Image (cartoon, rainbow, N blue to C red):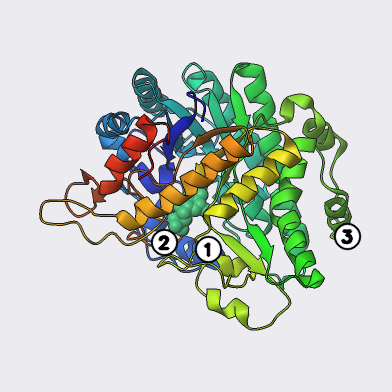
Amino acid sequence: MKDTFLWGGSTSAFQFEGGANEGGKGVSFYDTISRSSKAAADNMESWMGTNKIKDYTVTSDFYHHYEEDIQLMSEMGFKSFRMSVAWTRIYPDGDGNVNPQGIAFYRNVFSLLKKSGIEPVVTLYHWDMPQSLIDRYHGWYGIETVHAFEQYAETCFRAFGEYVKYWLTLNENNMTIMMPGFGTGMKKTKDDPDYDIFKYTVFHNTNIAHFAAVRKCHEIIPDAMIGCMFASALAYPLTSDPEDVLLARNHNQKLNYDYLDLLTRGRYTPKNVFEMKQAGFTVSEEDSKLFSDPKSIIDFISFSYYFSVCTGTEQNAADENAGTVQMMYQAMSNPKLKKSTFGWTIDPTGLRILMNDLYDRYQLPVMIVENGLGVKDDILTEDKEVHDDYRISYLREHIKAVKAAVDEDHVDCLGYLPWGCIDLYSASGDRDKRYGFIYVDYEDAHKRYRKDSFFWYQNVIKTNAEELD
Ligand code: BGP
């Protein structure tokens, strides 16, 4: 592993930052849920499944704890920290006037990170769509939202470029093709006659936003690196039946590679173009020009990796995954692998396979910006210890896989930033699903406690993963 390897951790604003009603922040989609909007909560459920979290106002309260948190990260030896900027903290309405307090907040955070030797890795959009853009333009369904995003991205590059050298555009945007309504405030089902055109309109708009931001970043901060962020969905064939192999190939193409081919080649795949045309959607010449501009092409590929799935023609197996994200993929259980208590398959070797596949295919550096084990850590003992050996063993096996990919397979990997390094609210709506090295006591002033994994990860970083036990 290179000495420059970016060991770190990862978060997002709506799950971690809090301070929703402070510092001039505007209202995002998640704040609308917090204000008991049944419509917003229903909309989220219609795209994401059940959501038990009803209030995102404070979450882990990074807004008030950032100095302490950066100190803890520094104690662990972090070289990098991924966070997102809350769009509504910069532009309370999504567009219009900038909020100087928002700019000041992030400048303070980024400069403290830099002083502490930690590289900020910044996501521009991690799902917290400004409510005003939903109300006026149906979020990503309206091209006006894309223009607002371009303005917001440019403001961030200018205001934070001096501190931030690693940028990510839209979180897990390959999922938009499966959940196009998320971030639009619109409820649509596959039975709606205009579903396909709706889907491609939203997906294409998010892609314009992505390419425009990449180009701007390259123009404004020439020494920065900007990447995408995609949710990896590695599928294996359930059996060696060629039909199963074909299904797995098609799954990987549709959910991973269609998106990455677009982002790295600057054009939709021929099959995508055909499907879009069939739905009555055409890409303008102006957009094609933007996409194919070399300045709009990403510098690295970053992704989340939690599990692999199986696909096959055999019936019945799919039901076993009910209630998990894997169900969205119509996937089947892998008889060779165990699952977490939340039903996510645990597959460290899959991470090595994926890193190789990505590097072979695109010859761009990769960065793992999410990975980890979400579990209910209800064992905060009297002396405030959390003995999370299950988390250590999950992370150990995944880090071994990263090391093998780097040292043995020679994949160029920039860093490893496991998810929710300090406990935060789960995206699938369960506050008790924790990922952190640091426990946050939501019931008692958001106090922070070092878990056993904190000390273990500290040593991993110190020894550059030479010591993993
Ligand atoms: C990714 C998201 C994160 C995150 C993570 C874990 O899809 O980018 O926001 O939360 O998944 O998922 P969950 O919180 O549902 O366990």
Badge 3 density bin: few <14, some 14–19, many ≥20, Cα 10 Å: few
Q: Quadrant of residue 241?
A: bottom right
Badge 2 density bin: few <14, some 14–19, many ≥20, Cα 10 Å: some
Q: Which mark is residue 48?
A: 1
- At mark 3, the secondary structure is helix
Q: Amino acid at mark 1?
A: Met
Q: Is residue 90 left or right of residue 422?
A: right
Q: Amino acid at mark 2?
A: Gly
Q: Is residue 238 left or right of residue 449?
A: right
- At mark 1, the secondary structure is helix
**Residue ID for mark 3:** 278
Q: CA distance from mark 1 to mark 2?
A: 9 Å
Q: Nearer the viewer, residue 329 or 38?
A: 329
Q: Nearer the viewer, residue 283 or 48?
A: 48
Query: What residue is at 41 percent from the left and 28 percent from the top?
Result: 79
- Check whether the beta carbons of the residues at disc 1 and disc 2 lie within 8 A of each other: yes
Q: Is mark 2 within 8 Å of ligand 1?
A: yes
Q: Nearer the viewer, residue 381 or 63?
A: 381
Q: Is residue 322 above or below residue 89?
A: below
**Residue ID for mark 2:** 429
Q: CA distance from mark 3 to mark 1?
A: 27 Å
- At mark 2, the secondary structure is loop
